[in-house]
Image (cartoon, rainbow, N blue to C red):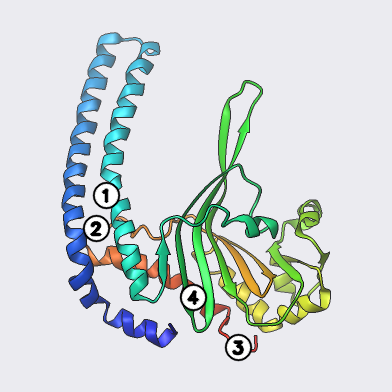
Amino acid sequence: MNMDDLSAKLDDFDHFYNDELKPLLESLETKRKEAYSTFIKVVIGVMVIFITIAILLKNIDQMVFVAVPAFLIVGYFYRKMAIFRAQAKHMIMPEICTRLGMTYHQKPRNNATQMFRTLSLIPSYDEKKLEDEVRGCIDDVDFNLFEAKLINVSRDSKGRTTRNTVFKGLLANFDFHKNFVGTTVVSGDLTALGNFLTGWAKGGDRVKLEDPEFESKFEVHSTDQVEARYLLTPSLMERILKFSNMANVKGLELAFHDRHLFMSIKRDKQYFEGGGYDLDDLKYIKENIKDITFIFDIINQLNLAQNTKI
């Protein structure tokens, strides 16, 4: 697959949607709307019952015994409605990816985050939720990419548990067609104190580069100073800065290791969900395609194709 192939396939996508995808989604959308109607009726009914009981009881402390089951009932019917959107994603993503010359897996392998953790591209965590892995080859660049939500679990002196999301976004791995043997990690600059406290975990030595804008935004550590400068050419640093400033990139860290470029890309929005459109609306499909073509943006913006001199 190359950029020209992508353009040709996207130009013909309306026909593919009407012939292949729309029939699959229309039935699900009908069921989703029925479930949504039921959900609204349940919410209204629960609210009426809750308010009536509140008036009769006139006791705020006792209302918790009403609020908890009311919350559980509403949650149950919300999940029954939301499940159709999840089913639609798992139905269409393999079709779209196959159409674009990629493969889709609902769940990545369980140890998929291991190398990202080893390279300090993600923070330590206690729980993880991994989904939506996309694999493929674009312009001779093999890649795999998946969504990750990483959670830190803490407990206070009374045993109460708190869960905090420490990372949400994409973890990606691309072929990097340059010869190197060391490891170079590009992480977000955390000011002098933050860099001092976390620098030990990066491995290698701090690398000083000549681009002041890049230096102000990123901190670089490498096991080989010469090799780090060989990899991080002025043009590549410029492209990394440009990519990191894209609206849908909230945070970016990279590592060059074993002829691969590993990336962690923070993003608030969840990928491959198609927005809030009806399931049989073409815009729903196009939102998913937009998320998939983000992969092309990475390869294009960073100029990772095999024939590049970087």
Q: Report, in whole angstroms, how far the alpha carbon at label 2 lies from the one at label 4.
A: 26 Å
Q: Quadrant of the N terminus?
A: bottom left
Amino acid on which the number 4 mark rests in the picture: Asp
Q: Quadrant of residue 151?
A: top right
How many numbered markers are drawn? 4
Secondary structure, mark 3, is: loop
Residue under the image location 81 percent in, 68 percent down: 223
Q: Which of marks 3 and 2 is nearer the N terminus?
A: 2
The answer to whether residue 287 of the structure is visible from this angle is no
The answer to whether residue 117 of the structure is visible from this angle is yes
Q: Report, in whole angstroms, how far the alpha carbon at label 3 lies from the one at label 2.
A: 40 Å
Secondary structure, mark 2, is: loop
Q: Residue 84 carries which label?
A: 1
Q: Mark 3 points at which residue?
A: 308
Secondary structure, mark 4, is: helix
Amino acid on which the number 1 mark rests in the picture: Phe
